[in-house]
Image: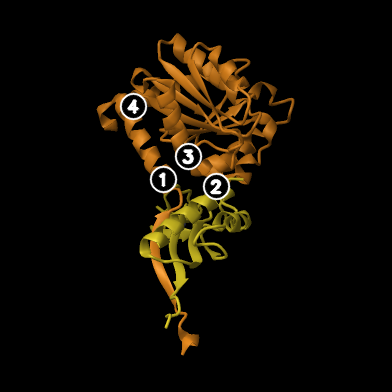
Chain colours: A yellow, B orange
Amino acid sequence: MHELSIAYNIVQIADDAAREAGVERVDAVHLRLGQLSGVVSEALLFGYDIAAQGTRLEGSRLEIEDVPVVIFCAQCRAERELESIQVFCCPECGTPSMDIRSGNELEIGYVEYSDEPAHS
Amino acid sequence: MWSTAMNPRILEIRKGVLEKNDVLAASLRERFRKAGVLVLNVVSSPGSGKTALLEVTLQRLLAQGYRAAALVGDLATDNDAARLARSGASVRQITTSGNCHLEAHMIGDHLRDWKLEVEGLDFLFIENVGNLVCPSHYDLGEDIRVVMLSVTEGEDKPLKYPPMFNSADAAVITKVDIADAVEFDRAQTITNINSVRPGMTIFETSAKRGTGIDAWIAFLIAQHDALKSPAAR
Ligand SMILES: [Zn+2]
C-alpha cells in the first residue's frame, strides 16, 4: 500500500503551492496518472481523503486523468498507443518497442479553487 | 449579487509527485558515477531466492578482488543482512518499519551513518523490500535495476507486474535446479518477460548448484568496467 504515501506527497505539494499563491481552500486537485505508474486509482482516492485532513485540501476532490502508454514504433515511424501494458509491441505492425513516450506520469497538473465571496 | 461570487479558478502546478525522491536519486547517481561504483537495485517477490543469489554474487566478486557492499531493505528482521554478511562483504540493514519499498533518502541517510566510503567500492547492491509493486516508482540512483523471480513463481509473473518488469534492465531467474520438479515453463516465462520488457537481459541461475553464475558475474563486471571507460562519460 504505497498509495497512502503517494497521497501524502500529492497533498503536501498542492498544499504548499496553494499557500504560496495565497489560496486558502482548494476544491480539486488534477492528477495525471500513467498506466505504467503502477498506482491503483481506488486506493489513491481512499488515501487522498485521509491525507487531506487538516490541510487546505480537506474535503476536496482528487480528479485522476488516466494517461495511456504510448510507444514510438521504429517500423511505422509513428507514435502508437498500446492496447495492453502486458505487450510492448506496436499494435499495427507488431514491432517491439521500449521507446516509451508517455505512460509513466505521476504528476499534479493544477488545482482548482474558488474566489472567496467578497466581504462587504 | 452574491450568488455569482464563486468563480472556479485554476492554479497551475505541473510537478511530479515523486519529484523530491527523483532529485535526491539524481544526486546519488552523480555521486556513484564519480566514485566509479556500479549500483544495483534488486527487486523481487518475497521468497524469490534473492538473498541466496546475492550471497553467492558477493562471494564471487570478493574472491576476484572486487570491493562490494550491500544495503538490505527489510520490513523487520535482520536475517537477510546477517546471511549476506557471511560472504565477507560490508552489509548494512535498512529497516523500513512496515514501509513497502526503499526511497532515495533512506539510501543517502544510511550511507552517511554507515560511514562507508562509496569511493572505495566497485559494487553496491541494494536489496529492496520483497514486493513487485511499490518499489517500481522509486529511483534509488541505481545504474541497473534487476528483477529476480524464482522458477516456483509461475510464468505469468511478468504479466501480473508490468510496471516493475518494464522498468527493470535485467531479469534473473533463480532456483533453476528445481525447475523440472515444479514444472517450470521456461519458454513461456521468457516470452512473457520479453512481452512486457522487449530486449531484457535474462540470466537463468541456481545459487545452490552454481548454474549460470559465471554469466551473471561476467555481466556485472562488464557493466562495472563500462562505467570507467571514457565512452561512459
Ligand atoms: Zn508499427
Element under label 1? helix
A55 in relation to B176, above or below: below
- Residue B134, compared with residue B48, is above or below; it is below
Query: In this image, B161 relative to A70: left or right?
Result: right
Residue B177 sits in quarter = top right
At numbered mark 3, what does the secondary structure look like: helix, strand or loop? loop
Which amino acid is tagged 4? Ala
Question: Is disc 4 placed on a helix, strand or loop?
Answer: helix
Residue B6: x and y in percent read 47, 80
Q: Nearer the viewer, residue A80 or B83?
A: B83
Ligand 1 closer than 8 Å to the CB at disc 3?
A: no
The label shown at residue B20 is 1
What numbered label is drawn on residue B134?
Answer: none
Residue A36 visible within the image: no
On the image, numbered disc 3 is attached to which residue?
B199
Q: Nearer the viewer, mark 3 or mark 4?
A: 4
Do the CB atoms of the residues marked 2 and 3 lie less than 8 Å apart?
no
Q: Residue at x 40, y 14 (%)?
A: B66
Disc 4: which residue:
B226
Task: Specify the amino acid type for callout 2.
Answer: Ser
